[in-house]
Image (cartoon, rainbow, N blue to C red):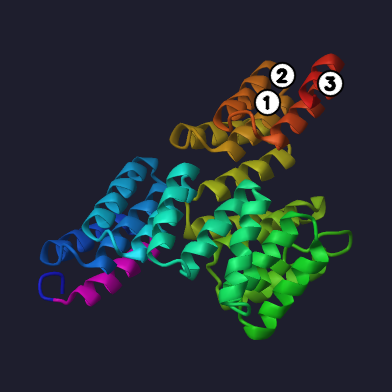
Amino acid sequence: LVRAGSAAEALNWGQCLGRLGLFEEAQEIFTIALKREPRNPFLLQARAYLLAKWSQSDPRQAEAAAVAFAAACQALPHNVYLWQARGASEAERRHRHGAETCFAKALSLDPGNLPALTARADMYLESGDWEKAWEDLQRVQELAPNHIYTLHLLGRWHFYRGEWTAAQESWQQLLQLDRHSLYALQSLGQWPGAGAAQEAAAYLERALELDPENTAVLLELALLHLADPAARDQAAAYLARALAVEPANPKLLVSRAHLLLEQGEATRAREELEHLLARHPENIPAWHLLGRTFLALGQPEEMAQAFQKIVQLSRGRNLQVYLTWAESARHLGHQEEAGHLLT
């Protein structure tokens, strides 16, 4: 099949291998197929996407993904979807300037391109740039007011701003359009407020029935049960299921370390986080949890070093670390330091 199959067959096979986490094998399939059709936009995009996904568990592939996207865009400079995909990859790597450049290029080729507009709105939402996110969302609403992903993003926009009722309305509307929408079920599973955990779990369990190996849903269920000291065995079970699917997923590994810390196993949590950071040195959630772990171990100097690392990585714009650091300083009796950090 590799030698005689069509590009479409190679594309499907490579994507299937990628979904299974067999990145090296998928890369080989795409490489062989691209020797026959070096300008095939679907193969070029798929290879770049594959490398971007691979880089989440192996940071050494991040540069290869960037090179693959650059090569694809150079070969097909007028392909709007390649520019959009490259922008999404840059946003995933937190390279905002590069992402904005790629999205702008995609939109210059097609001003009404929905994937580019939603991807850029998604990036702005994640970075807390509400005004720019809203500008893109308004344009998206004009183009596709009842589009499934439009409603998903609108719900997130309201959710991030603390407007839960409006977020709930968007996601419920989405669920009416598609009762099997994982986006809606998972989002409604983030239900805030006292006494809402059972209802949130019900939404997430419905999502899990539709996709039993969905690591994002499994993680949400684990975090939901982690908040309840009596349900931490269930949290551990959900995390184990998720890690069986994606054993190198950094979000899952940070959450497992969080569970260990809550269970009073701070030393094991520290060891797991240090191992993770050796592979992913720019993982801010891991540094944040490591700082809290050092506090639990009675090592305030190491805690401060971990938090200072976050300040460097985020260029001083991480509000959560300042709040945690200030609270930790107050806990240690360093009132002046706590006041300085809050200022």
What residue sits 67% from the left and 23% below the top?
Answer: 303
What residue sits 77% from the left and 23% below the top?
Answer: 341
Looking at the image, residue 319 lies above or below residue 205: above
Q: CA distance from mark 3 to mark 2?
A: 17 Å
Q: CA distance from mark 2 to mark 1?
A: 7 Å
Q: Which residue is mark 3?
A: 339
Q: Which residue is mark 1?
A: 294
Label 3: few (<14), some or many (≥20) within 10 Å?
few
Label 1 near label 2: C-beta < 8 Å?
yes
Question: Mark number for residue 247?
Answer: none
Q: Which residue is mark 2?
A: 300
332 or 144, which lies in front? 144
- The quarter of the image holding the N terminus is bottom left
SS assignment at label 2: helix
Mark 2 vs 1, N-terminal side: 1
Instruction: Give x and y (percent) for residue 154.
Output: 67, 66
User: Is residue 95 visible to the viewer in this orientation of the structure?
Assistant: no
Relative placement, left or right, of 6 versus 106 is left
Q: Provide the residue span drawn in magenta.
A: 5-21
SS assignment at label 1: helix
Mark 1 vs 3, N-terminal side: 1
User: Is residue 254 visible to the viewer in this orientation of the structure?
Assistant: yes
Label 2: few (<14), some or many (≥20) within 10 Å?
some
Instruction: Give x and y (percent) for residue 328.
Output: 79, 26
Q: Amino acid at mark 3?
A: Gly
120 or 66, which lies in front? 120
Instruction: Give x and y (percent) for residue 9.
Output: 23, 76
Q: Amino acid at mark 1?
A: Phe
